[in-house]
Amino acid sequence: MSGWVWAGAAAALVVLVLARRPLAALGRLLGRSGVGLAFLWAFQSLGSWLGTQLGVNLFNALVLGVLGLPGFALLLMTQWLVG
């Protein structure tokens, strides 16, 4: 039975080595989206003072995480066009 455990561990190691880059990219995206979510939360009070309101949600955080500052401008322009 221990032979199967070693084979399973070796297979799991091979999968982790092969998926290293996609997992790293996913980790970077999650980190950047977390920062975007924190920025949206901080912008919530300032935005009401400026007369604009962006929702604090996962979609907006992903847009900020992927696009950064241009994504923030895109969200503001979209809110301006729709609102």
Image (cartoon, rainbow, N blue to C red):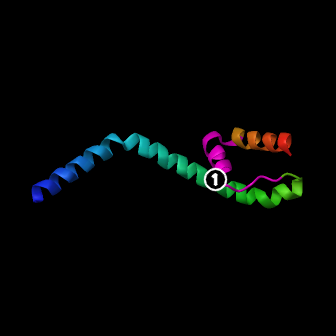
Report which residue position mark 1 lands on. 58
In the foreground, 25 or 78: 78
Q: Residue at coordinates 23% horizontally, 47% vertically from top-left?
A: 11
The amino acid at mark 1 is: Leu
Residue drawn at the location 71% of the way across and 56% of the way down: 56
Say left or right for 47 vs 17: right
Q: Principal SS element in the magenta part? A: helix
Q: Which residue is drawn at 44% across and 45% down?
A: 24
Q: In this view, does 82 lie to the left or right of 58?
A: right
**Quick check: is 55 in the magenta stretch?**
yes
**Residue numbers of the magenta segment:** 53-69
Secondary structure at badge 1 equals helix
Toward which corner of the image does residue 35 lie, by quadrant?
bottom right
Q: Residues within 10 Å of mark 1 (few under 14, many from 20)?
A: few
User: Vertically, is 5 above or below 68?
Assistant: below
User: Where residue 15 appears, x then y in whole percent?
Assistant: 30, 44
Determine the residue positioned at 83% across, 42% down.
Answer: 82
Verify whether residue 24 appears in magenta.
Answer: no
Q: In this view, does 43 lie above or below 15?
A: below
